[in-house]
Image (cartoon, grey):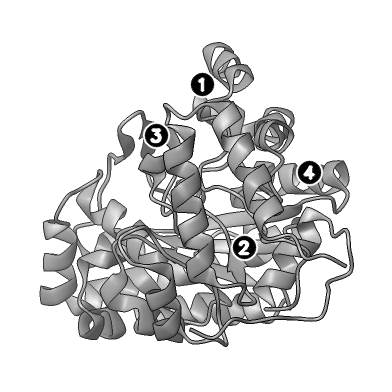
Amino acid sequence: MQHYTFPPASSPQTGAERILNACARRPVDSTPIWFMRQAGRCIIEHQEMRKKYDLMTMLKTPELCVQATLMPVQAYGVDAAVIYADIMLPLEAMGVDVAITNSGPVIHNPIRTLQDVEALRIVEPEESVPYILESLRLLRSEIAGKQALIGIAGAPFTLACYLIEGQPSRDYTQAKTLMYSQPEIWAALMEKLSTVTASYLVAQIKAGADVVQLSDSWSGALSPSLYRRYVLPYTQRVFAAVKQTGQPAIHYGASTAALLEAMTEAGGDVIGIDWRMDLDAAWERIGTDHGIQGNLDPTFMVTPWPVLEEQTRDLLRRADGRPGHIFNLGHGVPYATEVDQIRRLVDTVHQLTAVQP
């Protein structure tokens, strides 16, 4: 394997500079690191907030959202603050009766007919999610460029599956049945969802996000050919809109080892991968003109430190110093993770990859 070396990066860089440089595959002074679902999973202060406020109150109250977003930045020393939000939020203004429960979103009026799709409204983000945009504006001022500010959205396919299934699913039978047997309904739904998602991500960037991540947690249910037929055109539309802003985008998928090449065609600058594939092999398939994010198995976060450290070193060896690596887990932080374990991991990644001036 070739070992990549670069001219020394300007040092020290801020977390924002590390993330943005990695997205553009430029030199960094150390590998940037953040975590999906980093906000509050194991932070005592966040747990105390949840005792006082329900989730929707926290999401829709900018002051509370900002507090929750900043807690992991202060506790872990990560290079990015990711907006404390849920991917289902833009759907409410579309006319979707959604409840966010402990076991996941529940849709009380799932999509079944073309009339159901036609009833969905397309609402501009300033009207549908003003609280998220205000939170981003406040965060932008608060972090002042010290960390990257990451916006998030659910990808059209994952949102469509929720809307059709009505709840989390293991096999997505209802969604896939509609997709295969009633393609006109599927196309109409994906058209609306891609429009709303694109507007949402662009609005997040205008409100202050440095980077946005499109999360397609359920796309691994499809083969590459079916993904290209039923999903890719709509995902490409989202990334094309983001590209017009000049800001980078991350494309994350779960269980998507079979889809890497197709996901790369969608237009994201960085491909986020889960732990079910080796990072070096995945990067060879993605190609060096894209960055890669990941992909530590989240379970290692609750193992003894020597086990976690060994796996961290192995992952960094696979990254091999190539430009464009953002260290992350292959999915969200486990609830049982200790804050000291996360902080130690962040410090270790920065130390092991530090470039000497």
Q: Is residue 337 left or right of residue 184?
A: right
Residue corresponding to mark 3: 303
Residue 337 pos. (x, y %): 47, 30
The answer to which of marks 3 and 2 sits earlier in the sequence is 2
Q: Nearer the viewer, mark 4 or mark 1?
A: 4
Which residue is more in the foreground, 93 or 221? 221
- The residues tagged by marks 3 and 1 sit, at their Cα atoms, a distance apart of 31 Å
Q: Residue at x 40, y 58 (%)?
A: 120
Which residue is more in the foreground, 276 or 195? 276
- The residues tagged by marks 4 and 2 sit, at their Cα atoms, a distance apart of 15 Å
Residue 296 pos. (x, y %): 44, 53
- The residues tagged by marks 1 and 2 sit, at their Cα atoms, a distance apart of 26 Å
Q: Residue at x 26, y 85 (%)?
A: 229
The quadrant of the image that shows the C terminus is bottom right
From what the image shows, is residue 29 above or below residue 77? below
- Which amino acid, mark 4? Leu
The answer to which of marks 4 and 1 sits earlier in the sequence is 1
Residue corresponding to mark 4: 139
- The residues tagged by marks 3 and 2 sit, at their Cα atoms, a distance apart of 30 Å
Residue corresponding to mark 1: 54
The answer to which of marks 1 and 2 sits earlier in the sequence is 1
> Is the Cβ of the residue at disc 4 closer than 8 Å to that at disc 1?
no
- Which amino acid, mark 2? Val
- The residues tagged by marks 3 and 4 sit, at their Cα atoms, a distance apart of 33 Å
> Is the Cβ of the residue at disc 3 closer than 8 Å to that at disc 1?
no
- Which amino acid, mark 1? Asp
